[in-house]
Image (cartoon, grey):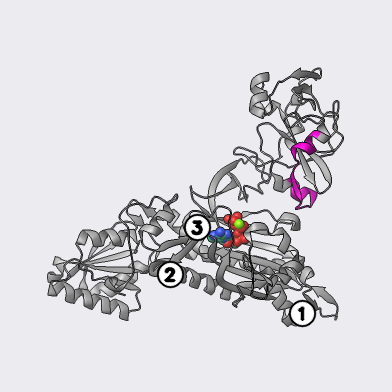
Amino acid sequence: MRYSQMLIPTLKEDPSEAEVLSHKLMLRAGMIRKLAAGIYSYLPLAQRVLRKTEQIIREEMNRAGAQEVTLPFVQPAEIWQKSGRWNVYGKELMRLKDRNNRDFCLGPTHEEVVTELVKNEVTSYRQLPLNLYQIHIKFRDEMRPRFGIMRAREFVMKDAYSFDVDEKRAEESYQRMYQAYHNIFKRCGLTFRAVEADTGPIGGNFSHEFMVLAETGEDSIFSCNRCDYAASGDKAETGKAEDGSADNLSLGELKSVRTPNKRTVEEVTQFLKVKPEQLIKTLIFQEGDNTIAALIRGDHEINELKLQNLLKTEDLFLASDEAIEKVTKAPKGFAGPVGLDIKVFADNSLKGMKNFVTGGNEKDAHLVNVNLERDFQVDSFCDLRFAAEGDSCPRCDHGQLVMSRGIEVGHIFKLGTKYSEALGAKFLDDKGKAKYMVMGCYGIGVGRTVAASIEQNHDENGIIFPVSIAPFEVIIVSVKPKSPEVKDASERIYAALLNAGVDVILDDRDERPGIKFKDADLIGIPLRITVGAKVKDGYVDIKLRKSREAVLVKVEEIVEKVREMINSD
Ligand code: ATP
Ligand code: MG
């Protein structure tokens, strides 16, 4: 390609709308432009990067035995009603009506569609296993679209769905995808980690998120500093080594104290001059028609997802002020477990605690010297809180959890028979018995992967793409395009590289060298060949974008040298 003919509208200034570097750089490099919140046009450079990323994904998916399809983006409400998600998906699902007033939605994910397809086409165990994937547009009406194409509303996803005869085979399909994802992100040049992720009500250890490590990541990751345990912030387990820490303390006398208008952990602990870890927060939740209490230390944070999984429900929310008042007989902010007549779940960290502070179930009152067993009973001790840095590792003996930040680029998930049951996807096994197919689903955000790569690979001058996904592998900058010698040599090198199958762009613009160098750096092309005055003596410069290392190369040797440099990236 010739630069002069391409649409690469680079910007000199940082766009004010961009919060994170990848967003800023993609705008500045002329890769993307916003049409509406979370809705972007991909310009030629971005298109090339996306295509290369998609090709890597495609090759690895095919290698793992998956087959590419294209599933409809516009989906009828009926299949979503069958799976029960028409009502629970909420506002992220973009709903619309056709001219006959029938309900449709724009696909945010394709479990329903693919299950409907497979249900009609697959009837025998002989047709399984099956793994179907597509690389296609998704629409999710995100509450907070941001960071450019990293959290967009319209975005490209690779989504795959596996169908197997039983759990064991489904686990094998899952492992194949796990390996394929490793290969994909490695080939994209990313530093990443696969972390255990929440499986929701399905349970088991079959959900992993692939996280690209980056400071700006929206997700937290906990990993052990000794063993290979790593989990997402939601999932990271806690609770080990928290028993018996206050063994020697004798029990104090239970007392009610006045705490006028002091409701929050901060207000109460400052007023009573105790540390937050000596206070127990009592959170009242509504689970369907039931009200329950969750107890957790003042310095910890409740993880509602853990509570949901424990109760095997998705219908759980913090009780309203009225509901709290009804069960505690006190306004919000004064709830406590003593005398409470509902089920009480306590975080494991409470086990070793003595003489703590709780709400008094009375307006403007708290209790001090509260103790387990003596003053109240717990129905169940469990892991209810978010992990924190320094917690003991749930897997090994002496390790501690360390927190880092990541960008979730991929997610693999064992679905079990949730969708095959809902939509009736059955097959006949080798004994002629009808069974539900066991499914898995596997997503990769293609645009998010590209943005994550930029978060990891950039410097003050711009993007540093790895060769595998760069819009071009090589840029030829002719420093004086009007000089016949330079022009001629540039054209010859360009033709030779094209002939050799190198993905090359020739910057033939009539611009100052400084501008061309700046643009080449900004758009992140891994190799830059500068054709200038030295061409008279038969030499050109090759510079590596990443290391900034430059070498003088003979024009005749250029193809060989470029190949060598590309292959060593
Ligand atoms: P998140 O928690 O970030 O919203 P998710 O759990 O909703 O992600 P999945 O439903 O597992 O995401 O989708 C699979 C992949 O699609 C994600 O790993 C991510 O890479 C990508 N993805 C999800 N939402 C978006 C979005 N709004 N914009 C761009 N990519 C997205
Ligand atoms: Mg989401």
Estimate the x, y position of residue 282 in percent, counting from the top left.
Answer: 75, 34
Residues rendered magenta in the picture: 307-325
The residue wearing badge 1 is 125
Q: Residues within 10 Å of mark 3 (few under 14, many from 20)?
A: some
**How far, Cα to Cα, is label 3 from label 1?**
46 Å
Instruction: Indicate if the residue with disc 3 has its beta carbon within 8 Å of ligand 1.
Output: no
**How far, Cα to Cα, is label 1 from label 2?**
40 Å
Q: Which mark is residue 37?
A: 3
Query: What is the secondary structure assignment of the residue under circle 2?
Result: helix
Task: Examine the rendered structure and indicate whether residue 354 appears above or below residue 169.
Answer: above
Task: Examine the rendered structure and indicate whether residue 441 appears above or below residue 261.
Answer: below
Estimate the x, y position of residue 522 in percent, counting from the top left.
Answer: 33, 58
Based on the picture, tell me whether residue 316 belongs to the magenta stretch. yes
Q: Residues within 10 Å of mark 2 (few under 14, many from 20)?
A: some
Q: Which residue appears at 31% of the width and 78% of the height?
A: 498
Name the quadrant containing residue 224.
Answer: top right
**How far, Cα to Cα, is label 3 from label 2?**
20 Å
Query: What is the secondary structure assignment of the residue under circle 3?
Result: loop
The residue wearing badge 2 is 47
Viewer-side residue, 42 vs 467: 42
Q: Residues within 10 Å of mark 1 (few under 14, many from 20)?
A: some
Viewer-side residue, 82 vs 402: 82
Give the left or right position of residue 384, taking residue 67 as reference: right
Estimate the x, y position of residue 68 in percent, counting from the top left.
Answer: 59, 77
- Answer yes or no: do the residues labelled 3 and 1 have beta carbons within 8 Å? no
